[in-house]
Image (tube, coloured by chain):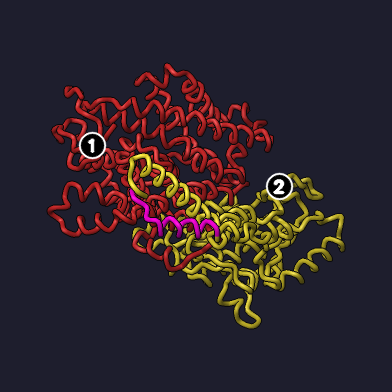
Amino acid sequence: MPITRRSFLAALGIAGATAAAPKNAEAWQSKAPPDPYGCLVDLTRCVGCRKCEQACKEVNDLPEPAIKFDDLTILDVKRRPDQNAFTVINRYYSGRIDDRDKLVPTFVKVQCMHCQDPACASACITGALSKKENGAVHYDVDKCIGCRYCMAACPFEIPAYEYDRPVLPRVRKCTFCFERISKEGGKPGCASICPVEAITFGKRSELLGQARERIKGDPGKYNDHIYGEREVGGTSWMYISNVDFGKVGFQALPTRPMPQTTETIQSGLFSYLWSPLALFGVLGAVMGYTSRKHDKEDGHDA
Amino acid sequence: MTHRPQPVAQPFWTPGVLVMLALMIAAGVTLVVRYTYGLSAVTNLNNHYPWGIWIGLDVASGVALAAGGFTTAFLAHILGRHYYEAVTRPALLTAALGYTFVALAVFFDIGRSWAIWKVVIYQNHTSALFEVAMCVMTYVTVLWIEFIPVLAEKLGHKIRLLAFLDRILDKTMWVFIILGVVLSCMHQSSLGTLMVIAPTKTSPLWATPLQPLLFLTSAFAVGYPMVVVETTIATSSLKLESEMNVLTPLSRITILLLGVYLFLKVGDLIWRGAYATLLDGSAQSGSFLVEVGLGVILPWVMLLFPAVRRSRRLLFTAALLIVSGVMLNRFNVFVVSFKAPYATSPYYPAIGEILVTAGSVAAIFFLYRLFVTWFPVLSAQRQEVSR
C-alpha cells in the first residue's frame, strides 16, 4: 500500500487545518416558532360527545369508524389515535364524586401535541416532518421513506402508520388542520365544532394567559398546572384540569426539549465535519509515517 | 512470514449450504408477502412498537459485528502491522457482506423502499439516522472498492475493467482505507445516538447520553473477537489450519479495548445512579445483567489468562461471548429497553420477522462461502499440507 510523498503531505495539511478549526459548536438553540397558534383544552368542560372526532374525520377525509360517533359505549375502553382517527376521546374515573355520591367522569381528548421542538421533526431522516411557523407539526408525504423513526422518537406516542399498505404507506397523525389554520380566521375542525367550548383555538401566548386567568379565577376548581406549557419544552396543544393529570392518562414528562441532547451531540461532533476531517488527517499522518518506516526497513527508498 | 490468500479447494455444495439455501428461500417468500400485503402481514410491528428485530438485530447488531473490517484495516494498513494481513481480507469480506445486508434490512423495513434514495436529496442534519444512513451508504461503496483488488486477482485477466480499476486503486487505496475507518467511527457512534432522543421511552439502564461513545468503544472491542469467531468457524468448517498465531496476539489487544468499554459502561451506570433498577427482577434488568456479566465481564476475565488466549477452543468461547454480548447490547438498546407508554401488550417478533432475519444470516454465510471458494480471501493452509 504505497503512499506517495504528495498524498502524505496533503493528509498532513488536512490534519493541520482541522486542528485549527473551531471545536465547539454553539450551545443548542430552540427552533420553536415565536408566535405559533395553539389549542387550550379545558378538561372540566368536555362532556365526551365525540363531536370533535366526527369533525376530524370529515375535515381530514378519514374512513368511517366501525362504531358510530353517537355510540358512547366505545368510551369503556381506552383508545389511541391511529391511522384512521387523528383524535380520540377517552373517559377516566379519577375518584372524584358529585353531590349524589356518583363517580364523575373526566373526558380527555388525545391528538398530536404539536410540540414546540418536536422530537419527530428532529429525528425525521428526510425532514418530512417539520414544525411550521403557525405551530403545526406538518407531514410531507413526498419526502417520507417510511423509516418510522418519528414514531420511536415521539414521547406522546402519536404518529401512526399504515402497516397494511404495501406500496404507499403513510405516517398519519393530527395535522392541526394545517390548511384551515393557514387561512385568516380558520380553526381546526375539532375546535370549531366543540359545543361546550372545551377547545379554545388561538395564539399560544394568549391561550397561556387565558389558562392562567381561569386557574386564578377558580383556584378551588382547577389544579395549578397547564399541561403542555413546559412539558418537553412546550407544546402547541395545552390542557387545564380539575383532576391530577397523572390520573387521566397524561405522562409526567421533563421540561427539557426532547431533541436537545441528540442535536447537541450531532452538531458537536459533525459541525463543519470537523471531527471526521481531523480523524482523517491524523490517520493519514500515522499511515504515512508507518509506511515510510516500513519501506526503510525493507531497504527501499521512500 | 508471507501470506498468500487463495481460493479454498473444497466442494461448495454441502448439507450446511443446502440448509442455508432453504432459509434464504423462506425469507424470500416472506418478503414477497411483505411487498404484497404490507408490513402488518409478516411483522408484529404496530403504532406502539414501530421498530422490531429488523432494526434491532439486522441493522444495529449487523453494523456492530462488521466492525472487524475497520479494526483490522486500522491495525494492518494504518498502523502498518503487516503481520495481521492474514485476517484483513476475510474481515473485509465479512464487513462488506454484513453492511450489504444491513442496507438490505433497512430497505425491507422502511415502508417506502422505492423512496430510499430520497435520503440523499432531502437531508435533515439534526437526525442521527440521517448521519447513519449516509455513512452506511458510503461505507458499503468503500468496502466493495476495497474488495476490488481481491476480485481483480482472480478475474482481472477476464474482466478488463476490474484490472483497470485495480491499477488505479494501487495508488489511491490508502484514501479508501482511511475513509473506511473514519466512516466507521462516525456511524458506529451515531447508531448509539439514535435512541437518545427518546429518554422517557427507554429503560434507564441504557438511556444515557454517553450511548454514542459506548457504541463506538464496543465496536472497537468487538472487532477482533469477531475476526476470531469468523476465522475459527471458517477454518474448522473448511478444514483449514487454525490461525492461532494471528488470533492469539489479536486477543491481547482486545483485553485493553474491552476493558475501556467495560470501564465506561460501569462508570456511566454508577455516575447516573441507574444501577438502582439493576436488581428489580424485571426483564430489562435481567437482560442487562446477562449482557454485561456474560457478554463483557466473563470474557474479559477469561482473556486475562494466557492459557485461554492460546487455546483455540477457549479463545473461541471468549470471543463468542463478546460477540454475543455486543449483539445483545444492540438488541437491548433498540428492543428490550423500549417502553411504549400506551402499549397494552409487549412486542415479540413475528415468525415472518424471524424468517427474514434467519434468511439474511444464512445468505451472509452462503455468500461468504461462495466468495472464499472462488476468490483468494483466506490465507490459511489446508490442514493436510505441512508448511
Instruction: Give the camera-side residue of A58 and B349.
Output: B349
Q: Is residue B41 magenta?
A: no
User: Tag 2: residue type?
Assistant: Gly
Q: Residue at x 65, y 35 (%)?
A: B274
Q: How far from the left and from the top, in percent, is residue B277?
A: 64, 32
Indicate the chain on which mark 2 is placed.
Answer: A
- From this viewpoint, is residue A266 visible? yes
Question: How many other residues sit within 10 Å of disc 1, few (<14), some (14-19) or many (≥20)?
Answer: few
Residue nearest the observer in this picture, A199 or B158: B158
Question: In this view of the protein, can residue A150 be seen by the observer?
Answer: no
Q: Are marks 1 and 2 in contact (CB under 8 Å)?
A: no
Query: Is disc 2 surrounded by few (<14), some (14 to 19) or many (20+) residues within 10 Å?
Result: few
Q: Which chain is yellow?
A: A
Label drawn at residue A1: none
Residue at horizontal 22 percent and vertical 29 percent from the top = B381
Helix, strand or loop: magenta stretch:
helix
Relative placement, left or right, of B253 versus B25 is: right
**Chain under callout 1:** B
> According to the image, label 1 marks what residue?
B4
Stretch of the chain drawn in magenta: A1-16
- Picture residue at 30% right of the left edge, 35% below the top: B86
Question: Identity of the amino acid at label 1?
Answer: Arg
Q: Colour of chain B?
A: red
Q: Which residue is mark 2?
A: A246
Closer to the camera in the image, A121 or B127: B127
Observer-side mark, 1 or 2, equals 1
**Is residue A13 magenta-colored?**
yes
List x then y, in percent, for residue B129.
49, 55
Depth check: B2 or B285 in front?
B2
Q: Position of residue B118 (x, y in %)?
A: 41, 65
Mark 2 element type: helix
